[in-house]
Amino acid sequence: MSELSERFEPGVAKPAGEKIRCDACPVMCYIAEGRTGGCDRYGNREGHIVRLDALTILHHAEEEGGAVVPFLDAAEDWGGDLVNGGRRFVSAIGAGTTYPDYKPAPFIVSQEVEGVDLVTVVTEGIFSYCGVKVKIDTDRHIGPETATVRAKGEAVGHVTTGEYGSQMLSLGGVHHLTGGSKAEGRVTCETLMDLCNRKPVELSIDGGATVIVEAGKAPVIDGKTEHRMRVGCGSATIGMFATQWRGLVDEVVVVDDHITGVVSEHQAGKVLGWEDTGIKIVGRRSTPGRYFKVSEPGLGWGGTTISDPLEILGDWNPKKGARPGLSLMMVSTTGEQFAYFELDDELKPVEKPFPQRLRKSVDLIEDNCEPALCTVLFMAGAGGSLRAGVTENPVNLTRSVQGLSTYVTCGGAPVYVWPGGGITLMVDVMRMPENAFGYVPTPALVAPIEFTLRRDDYVRLGGYESEIRSVDDVLARGGEYRNARSASAAPPRNLWPPLAQLRRNGQP
């Protein structure tokens, strides 16, 4: 009898009622009959350690650029299979694992795809070295760079450099998970898991705002739901729409925290023959028609602190074109704030009803704004222990991944692998099945990870050849941790990983 068969042999059950020790992680809980361990992932059922979540087998019914595959042909009788046998993928969700990995990964599955024998190594990784990068689409100032981000009062990360039209957070990491207090580690782990499982999390930023973040949903900043991501900075907005404004208004100012634009001075305006207006912007002039620091960052117009846009204007100069009756439109980079003014006899701007002729151009700015969303990327490093569950010589897996011989997925979703040493990856949690993440109380996050490569390559890098099984065998017999198998449709836009691997290797 092989070692694998012995692991599945039901005759080795211990007497009911006896506590048994779980070996899935360093906590090594003693679990009584009918109870679960500290992570709620494993339990004691009739004297066996059982992975409580079902092993998820993804069904790829649709491929990018391909035809939809019917669940069953009309003439085909269902044989009781969990899923259509067309394109199945054994994901690592519910697969189980151990940490450190002193034995092969829970499932090492072979499939022949277009004449090529591929192997997918399936395991749930335990990641102490992990975090999330959060992109919040908003112009509004949510906090100074490097400010501490807190959840339930505990420090869980910091504000990092803002990107184009978005504020960025870096949360988690080993120092928050294991380097602080026990409460900090526990709250950090809980925060990361909830974000990765697409649940809403309230975060407060020292010296800044309170933000409710939920992957795939609009951010809520200080109780206000954000709707639009800005179309661009003030200068870019002028470049895009100066033509639309020509002949309708004498001057346009696009108010923006980063670069406020003035059409009459801007290159786009000059090319179109815009005349000087004698306007003066209170700010630091960068290049003609582009101004920095017209205000401090805030929650007002264009991510500034101002609620009255006239605050950024100085005196108008009649020697450079200012005159009574000159018209001025001021607008933010999302089109959410806009106003119309005309200069009086003393060259002071006086607000007038917003003219209908300019309404279309404001609507155009709004129409070109993307919906404001929160994006959550899980980022982790597949350490040596995890790699030891894939091959007897772990560095070979690293070299195989970096050499593009091994295709990495998380719950079937494609990942971005960072250049350089190790296997450091990022994945969009919205492309993963829901509730794909768990935790262990060390504390650390548990995430699915799969490695797909050619069988001969797998054997060559020192893989566990004797542990390779077919998909059908996995469906029929399950695994060491005796959990159920469940079918689930693969999230859209994800290629079937075995096919993605073939294409990566240049197969037609």
Image (cartoon, helix red, strand yellow):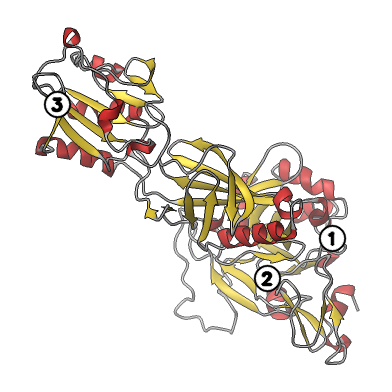
Mark-to-mark CA distance, 3 and 1: 69 Å
Secondary element under disc 1, as helix, strand or loop, is loop
Q: Position of residue 257 (x, y in %)?
A: 39, 32
Label 3 amino acid? Val
Other residues around mark 1 within 10 Å, as few (<14) / some (14–19) / many (≥20): some
- Counting residues from the start of the chain, the first of labels 1 and 2 encountered is 2
Query: Label 1 near label 3: C-beta < 8 Å?
Result: no
Front position in the image: 324 or 477: 324
Answer with left or right where residue 60 lies relative to residue 182: left
Other residues around mark 3 within 10 Å, as few (<14) / some (14–19) / many (≥20): some
Name the residue that disc number 3 marks: 249
Secondary element under disc 2, as helix, strand or loop, is loop
Quadrant in the rendering for residue 280: top left
Front position in the image: 341 or 409: 341
Answer with left or right where residue 239 lies relative to residue 146: left
Answer with left or right where residue 324 lies relative to residue 138: left
Q: Residue at x 53, y 61 (%)?
A: 198
User: Does residue 381 appear in this view?
Assistant: no
Mark-to-mark CA distance, 1 and 2: 18 Å
Label 2 amino acid? Gly
- Counting residues from the start of the chain, the first of labels 3 and 1 encountered is 1
Name the residue that disc number 1 marks: 100
Query: Label 2 near label 1: C-beta < 8 Å?
Result: no
Q: Residue at x 84, y 65 (%)?
A: 26
Quadrant assignment for the N terminus: bottom right
